[in-house]
Amino acid sequence: MKKLISIFMLCLMGASLTQVQAKTIEKDTFDVGGKSLTISFIGHGSLCFDYDGYIIQIDPVGRYTDYAQQPDADLILITHAHGDHLDANAVAQVEKANTKIILNQKAHDQLGKGKVMKNGDKETVDGIAIEAVPAYNLEKTNHPKGQDNGYVLQIGNKRIYVAGDTENIPELKNLKNIDIAFFPINRPTMTIEQAVDAAKIVRPKILYPYHYGDTDVTKLASKLAGEPIDIRIRDMK
């Protein structure tokens, strides 16, 4: 009986891994001033930026892809310590000897390494300017104020905002000249209405909903009709 259960569990694990491996990862490529930036939309909050061969893995988590098949990272950014954003095994799979890791304190406590950035901190890593910005809930307690990070990256001539887990917080008004933004749209992050409000505050040229689960993010485009914002929907459930 135990042998049958073991075989069954192995089959389930194999099927799950096959599903992860089988997903086609969508990609968009941008000219960022003489160099290219390719963004891979891995899933949920996990992204990969390929800046002319320089690899940035953001919130790598193994449930969204097989990170053994992902390119090794020159830089890893982690927004916070929740399991859908921080996976030590996935980090290990893309880490190499000289990989730099940027993360918040809670994620550092869990991972045991990396450079801690707090809200408001700024760093330049290999020519890429990074600013840690607030990411928190206004009323819920899932993401307390001051604990987690969003990041604004200057990559070539593009300013990119990766929001992490946040709502439409007042600090969004401090974000200027954002070319590409990633907004989380699924409770306990933003509702569609909050994302609309956030988009009108930040006014990115391109807006990608991510971390959206079962939320119908197509509603975002209709609610922002007439705004000069390019809404691009990729598979980031």
Image (cartoon, helix red, strand yellow):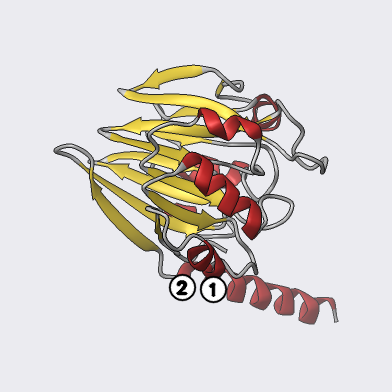
In the rendering, at what x and y percent does residue 156 appear? 26, 33
What label does residue 144 carry, if any? none
Q: Residue 61, can we see it? A: no
96 left or right of 14 in image: left
**Left or right: where 50 falls relative to 204:** left
Callout 2, which amino acid? Ala
Looking at the rendering, in which quadrant would you find the C terminus?
bottom right
Q: Residues within 10 Å of mark 2 (few under 14, many from 20)?
A: few
Q: Residue 190 vs residue 150: left or right? A: right
Nearer to us in this view, 14 or 22: 22
Residue nearest the viewer, comparing 69 with 157: 157
Residue occupying image coordinates x 79% and y 42%: 142
Going by the numbered disc 1, the residue's amino acid type is Gln
Q: Residue at x 71, y 28 (%)?
A: 147
Which residue carries the number 2 mark?
A: 22
Residue 217 visible from this viewpoint: yes
- As measured in the structure, the alpha-carbon distance from the residue carrying label 2 to the one carrying label 1 is 5 Å
Task: List x then y, in percent, for residue 52.
Answer: 22, 41
Do the numbered discs 2 and 1 sit on residues whose CB atoms are within 8 Å?
yes
Q: Which residue is found at the position 52% from the left and 41% from the top? A: 201
Where is residue 153 drawn, in percent x and y?
A: 41, 32
Res. 120 image quadrant: top right
**Does residue 154 sit above or below 23 in this rendering?**
above
Residue named by callout 1: 19
Classify mark 1: helix, strand or loop.
Answer: helix
Q: Residue at x 56, y 28 (%)?
A: 133
